[in-house]
Amino acid sequence: MPRAMVHEVTYPHPPSSVWRALTEPSALAQWLMTNDFQAQVGHRFQFRAKPVPGWNGIVDCEVKEVVPLQRLVYTWSGSNSKGKPYPPTTVTWTLEPAPGGHTKLRLEHSGLVGLRGWMMYMGMNNGWGQKMLRGSLPAMLDRWARGEMAPVPSSHM
């Protein structure tokens, strides 16, 4: 049976800012990984990071769904240190307006099956939940809100 990790966070920022953080390549690079992302269905892209034991540092992805300011879905497939791909999984971002101009963001990373899926769940759940969604992403959004870092002009809305 497929496993999924789900995280929900509410940010004190409007959906437009959170959407830009999820879809602007330079913003994604600041809180997640370097990339060649485009919010266009069918676009194949990569996230890249420093390799670690058991992972070559590359995640191959394909955009499956884009509903501006509401929903973004893409596949996610990493490879081991020798470049052998792991089974693809799916990352789904859902944004909902929340009271006070805030945004409720839901991440579901699904398709984590078998032993490899369990290992991904154990290895990535804290990274998504604590490091990214409760650490680097809100820190970047806060810097934008304070004017310390200008948001990248949006071309994907």
Image (cartoon, rainbow, N blue to C red):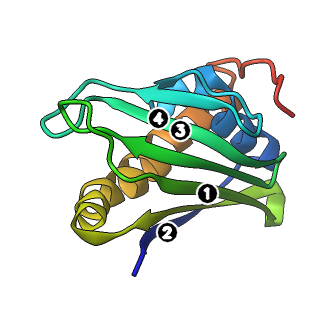
What separation in Å lies between label 1 and label 3 (alpha carbons)? 12 Å
**Which x, y percent locates residue 151?**
72, 22
Question: Looking at the image, which residue sits at the far front?
Answer: 84
What separation in Å lies between label 4 and label 1 (alpha carbons)? 15 Å
What separation in Å lies between label 1 and label 2 (alpha carbons)? 10 Å
Residue 92, disc: 1
Q: Nearer the viewer, residue 31 or 117?
A: 117
Secondary structure under the numbered disc 4 in the rendered image: strand
Secondary structure under the numbered disc 2 in the rendered image: strand
Image quadrant of residue 115? bottom left
Secondary structure under the numbered disc 3 in the rendered image: strand
Q: Nearer the viewer, residue 135 or 43?
A: 43
- Disc 1 crowd rating (10 Å Cα; few below 14, some 14-19, many 20+) is some
Answer with mark 1 or mark 2, whichever residue precedes in sequence: 2
Q: Are marks 3 and 4 in contact (CB under 8 Å)?
A: yes
Residue 61, disc: 3
**Which x, y percent locates residue 9?**
57, 62
Instruction: Find disc 2 in the rendering and name its residue.
Output: 6
What separation in Å lies between label 2 and label 3 (alpha carbons)? 19 Å
Residue 36, disc: none
Residue 60, disc: 4
Q: Are marks 1 and 2 in contact (CB under 8 Å)?
A: no
Question: Label 2 amino acid?
Answer: Val
